[in-house]
Image: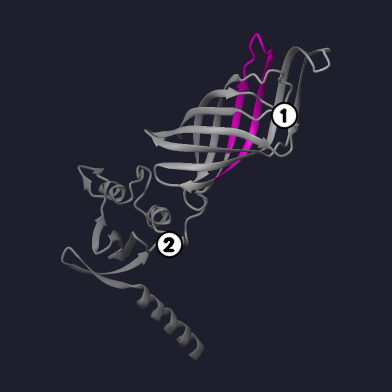
Amino acid sequence: MKYLLIVLSIFLTQISFSQQSYSVNGENLTLYPEAEGNLTLLWNSFDGNYRYFIKKGDEIVELKNTKVDGDYQEEYKDVLRNYTGSDTSKVKLTKADLVRAVDAYNVQNDASYVSKTTSVQLKARLGVFAGISNYPYFVNPDNTSLPQFGVELEIIDDVKLKRHSMALLLRHILGNNDYDFSSTQFSLNYRFKFVKTETFDIYVNTKFADFVHISQDLSFTDGNGEVTNIKASGSEFQAPFGIGIGTDIALGNGYLTFLYQDIFALNLNDNGEFSIDLVVGYKWNL
């Protein structure tokens, strides 16, 4: 019995320390803080009804959802959007949803804040691109640069892993009359964003898996004056570990992108020429 009283006393003491008194629009309220940071969620239950507040600095604003003529006005979404700058259309007026929204804001805007609630939240960006490539990992007698185009799907997490992303790229290199070589490639890439701001990112792109299909019809004379003909097509899986560098620049509802792919590939033999593999594109937030 004595042990139970001690445990109960400790529990009640912890509750009293977690509660704080606030003055809000002339009301003196005892509220619980959650996700404390640049932005803090305050809440408590009064007569069976939950009330929620947003605190930033000394300013405290109540999150309301009043009912007019049978319709909920959802004022809390506008208040939350003004404070966080994020899309709040899917946020419900529940403690769990509000904590997630405030926690996500603090993670992105408070360098000293440590998230206790937010897990990885994956998002996707879909992009298109076009550019040129001399693809130095195959025979290219005149070091001809060919046009290329493609699409990419990038998977990102703006909460806990905001400097890291994975990207799936599908690209096609087009041949011409002088260099009848074409290739379709599907690759898996890892990106580390060593510069990350609200307006642009700069990242290292590592291509570590690539499925490549090649078709060629080539005829050229080597250094000994012998004519070599290559006419074939085929596919193979590669682990090139190709290293590139890129940047994303915020523009509209997405990003203007520049990428220098495969500056060098650690696991591929080249033809002696320096890689020229440049693309520019645009990707949208999904």
Helix, strand or loop under label 1 = loop
Q: How far is mark 2 from mark 1, CA to CA?
A: 50 Å
Asked which quadrant contains residue 213, the reply is top right
Q: Is residue 183 magenta?
A: yes
- Could you classify mark 2 by the number of other residues whose Cα lies within 10 Å: few (under 14), some (14-19), or many (20 or more)? some
Quick check: 20 above or below 276? below
Q: Position of residue 153 (x, y in %)?
A: 55, 33
Q: Position of residue 241 (x, y in %)?
A: 68, 39
Query: Residue 272 has which mark?
Result: 1
Asked which quadrant contains residue 60, the reply is bottom left
**Looking at the picture, which amino acid does disc 2 mark?**
Tyr
Task: Point out the residue furthest to the left here.
Answer: 26
Range drawn in magenta: 167-192
Does 187 sit left or right of 53 as displayed?
A: right
Name the residue rendered at 58%, 37% in the picture: 167
Q: In this orientation, does residue 1 appear?
A: no
- Between 192 and 154, the one nearer to me in the picture: 192
Residue corresponding to mark 2: 113
Q: Is residue 226 magenta?
A: no
Which secondary structure type mostly characterizes the magenta part of the structure?
strand
- Between 214 and 175, the one nearer to me in the picture: 175
Quick check: 91 above or below 4? above
Name the residue rendered at 56%, 24% in the picture: 150
Asked which quadrant contains residue 31, the reply is bottom left
Q: Position of residue 55 (x, y in %)?
A: 29, 61
Quick check: 259 above or below 45? above
